[in-house]
């Protein structure tokens, strides 16, 4: 069984987000780029499965859509332990175009399980995994919080609104992964970083697909009014404010 | 032309979320000068379906074929695209919850329809169709144009008010052709949280952080939540420590919620935490560090020891309730 983990390249969460060119572009100056947190968890779980005896997982590859400047993020994923990587050499423009390009990677190889994080921390659309599955006409399981392979059979738990379901999923499929899938993201060790330099990154030609959406500009969230402080000796005042000023309780 | 709303039922019953979807769609359809059609998938009694008409929808289509007994995104996306095409929907509305996240992207590719997810405000303009979506985990909005003929919008829970507009609704069978379609996944076990207010549904959420110091100190948080018919939540370190279950973790990698009131107690307000709660209408912070970033996001705050303040707050709330 071969696993393909799709990786998005996003600003580190603690980075201050700023925009340039009249708020139409992300200002990339000073941004620390990281692997999208959910993708990092997917990769961690994929590697755990590969190491698990009897799982039948032979190879963990990664796929990414982005120009050459995003390669450090791919190298990071290889350093964590992925065997090889595919990069579609084009700018990521929206979820639809990214999914269409990832579909080309899937078609070019032989993958049984394709993992995507439930969302990316930049555009938060929660869309790429489901779109990829539809492009491929594959089964998709969304909101996976547990994933295991036993004797070649894939077991997942998917979170629903108000419960969860344990499923057996036939390969090939697209798994859309959320928190819980792995405890902590795995960190690259020195040996992994050295080895990553020699691991292959295969370039894939971009699919002939245009994005469906156009971002006109970015807007900062509405500023919140300054905090009104209540005397800690007198919390009754807070209840009074919530009842009569905010009128929310 | 029409606006198609995918309403979700839980064992045949609708929750407030579905009424929010209808309210949003009815308001939008008025501006677009078109009609709303509601779609309900799965077995539901007609009297339950009629509850949707309280919010202004006049046409309700239902799909009760046995092929939809199990939630299978492939089959559901086919049902939706068939109905959307037949109803000449120019806009499909659904919730930005687990179901919407599983379905909307599939539908987008199937119909080549542009998708805006996690929307919390009305469109900026209808022609061209421009709407704000959540970006950079709550640090910005992306003002996004959906230029395709059919558009899909998923809306954040608790972001739109219910607007009552009682009307007479016609209920019809959608008559979709899905016979022979079988889910390819096998469900082995289902666990349901029943009789419990879901964190994502709650209008009031009381959340504790590391400042609560240990799992034993949670009683006043639970009491405060139950006095206000709210739900309890926690920050990531708390669920990592195992003080509270993982389902309660709110924040970037946990649940993203937008209640009316969010009490952050003993939570410093790291970026990752705020990413999950910045959509809350009111944030109330209790923390012993007056420099904690949570106070920048909060409208009301108390600087002090949560352990001392909470019991007093519970008493004050009880008194106010009995007054």
Image: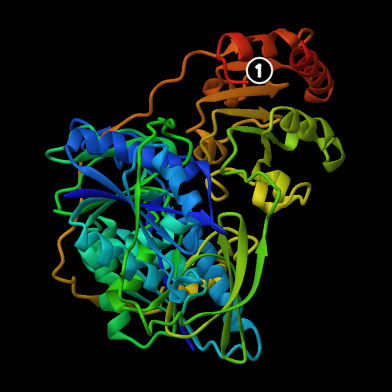
Q: Which quadrant of the structure image shows residue B125?
A: top left
A129 vs B163, nearest the viewer: B163
Question: What residue lies at 73% left-to-right and 21% top-to-bottom?
Answer: B288
| Nearest to the observer: residue B5 or residue A245 | B5
**Which residue is at 20% across, 37% downward?**
A24
* Residue count near mark 1 (Cα–Cα under 10 Å), binned few <14, some 14–19, many ≥20: some
Q: Residue at x 46, y 85 (%)?
A: A171
Residue B176 picture location, percent across and down? 31, 71
In this rendering, position of residue B205 left or right of residue A2: right
Looking at this view, is A239 or A108 the one in front? A239
From this view, report whether residue B321 is shown above or below residue B26. Answer: above
The quadrant in which residue B230 appears is top right
Q: Is residue A233 above or below residue A67?
A: above
Q: Position of residue B86 (x, y in %)?
A: 20, 62
Q: Nearer the viewer, residue B131 or B88?
A: B88
Q: Is residue A242 above or below residue A107?
A: above
Q: How is the image coloured?
A: rainbow
The local secondary structure at tag 1 comes to loop
Q: Indicate the quadrant where residue A133 lies.
A: bottom left
Q: Position of residue A215 (x, y in %)?
A: 21, 43
- What residue did someone put label 1 on? B290
Query: Visible in this render: residue A223?
Result: yes
In the rendered image, the vertical position of residue A20 relative to residue B48, given as above or below: above
| Residue located 34% across and 42% down the image | B57
Q: Chain of mark 1?
A: B
Residue A72 seen by the camera: no
Q: Residue furthest right?
A: B216
Question: In which quadrant of the rendered image does the C terminus of chain A lie?
Answer: top right
């Amino acid at each position: 069984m071969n696993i393909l983990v799709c990786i998005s390249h996003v600003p580190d969460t603690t980075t201050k987000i700023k925009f340039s060119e009249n708020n139409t572009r992300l200002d990339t100056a000073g941004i620390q780029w990281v692997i999208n947190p959910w993708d990092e968890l997917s990769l961690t779980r994929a590697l755990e499965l590969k190491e698990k005896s009897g799982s039948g997982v032979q190879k963990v590859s990664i796929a990414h859509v982005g120009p050459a400047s995003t390669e450090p993020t791919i190298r990071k994923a290889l350093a964590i332990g992925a065997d090889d990587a595919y990069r579609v050499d084009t700018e990521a423009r929206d979820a639809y175009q990214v999914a269409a390009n990832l579909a080309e990677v899937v078609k070019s190889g032989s993958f049984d399980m394709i993992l995507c994080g439930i969302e990316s921390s930049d555009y938060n659309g929660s869309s790429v995994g489901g779109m990829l599955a539809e492009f491929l006409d594959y089964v998709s399981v969304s909101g996976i919080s547990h994933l295991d392979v036993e004797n070649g059979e894939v077991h997942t738990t998917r979170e629903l609104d108000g419960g969860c379901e344990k499923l057996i999923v036939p390969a090939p499929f697209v798994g859309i992964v959320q928190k819980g899938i792995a405890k902590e993201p795995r960190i690259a060790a020195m040996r992994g970083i050295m080895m990553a330099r020699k691991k292959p990154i295969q370039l894939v030609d971009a699919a002939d697909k245009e994005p469906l959406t156009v971002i006109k500009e970015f807007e900062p969230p509405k500023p919140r009014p300054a905090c009104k402080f209540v005397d800690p000796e007198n919390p009754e005042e807070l209840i009074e404010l919530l009842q009569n000023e905010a009128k929310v309780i | 032309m029409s606006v198609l709303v995918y309403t979700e039922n839980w064992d045949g019953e609708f929750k407030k979320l579905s009424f929010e979807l209808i309210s949003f769609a009815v308001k939008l359809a008025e501006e677009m000068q078109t009609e709303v059609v509601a779609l309900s998938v799965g077995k539901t009694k007609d009297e339950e379906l009629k509850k949707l008409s309280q919010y202004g929808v006049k046409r309700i289509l239902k799909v009760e074929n046995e092929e939809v007994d199990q939630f299978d995104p492939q089959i559901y996306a086919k049902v939706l695209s068939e109905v959307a095409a037949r109803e000449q929907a120019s806009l499909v509305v659904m919730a930005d919850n687990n179901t919407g996240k599983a379905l909307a992207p599939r539908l987008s590719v199937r119909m080549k329809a542009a998708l805006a997810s996690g929307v919390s405000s009305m469109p900026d303009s209808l022609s061209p169709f421009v709407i704000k979506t959540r970006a950079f985990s709550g640090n910005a909005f992306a003002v996004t144009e959906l230029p395709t003929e059919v558009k899909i919008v998923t809306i954040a829970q608790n972001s739109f008010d219910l607007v009552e507009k009682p009307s007479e609704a016609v209920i019809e069978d959608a008559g979709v052709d899905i016979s022979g379609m079988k889910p390819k996944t096998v469900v082995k076990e289902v666990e349901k949280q029943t009789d419990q207010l879901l964190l994502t549904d709650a209008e009031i959420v009381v959340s504790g952080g590391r400042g609560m110091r240990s799992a034993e100190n949670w009683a006043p948080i639970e009491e405060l939540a139950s006095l206000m018919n709210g739900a309890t939540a926690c920050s990531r370190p708390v669920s990592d420590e195992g003080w509270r279950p993982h389902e309660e973790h709110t924040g970037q990698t946990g649940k993203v919620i937008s209640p009316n009131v969010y009490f952050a107690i003993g939570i410093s307000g790291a970026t990752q935490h705020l990413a999950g709660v910045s959509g809350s209408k009111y944030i109330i912070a209790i923390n012993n560090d007056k420099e904690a970033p949570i106070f920048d996001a909060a409208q009301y705050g108390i600087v002090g020891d949560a352990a001392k303040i909470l019991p007093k707050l519970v008493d004050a709330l009880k008194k106010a309730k009995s007054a």
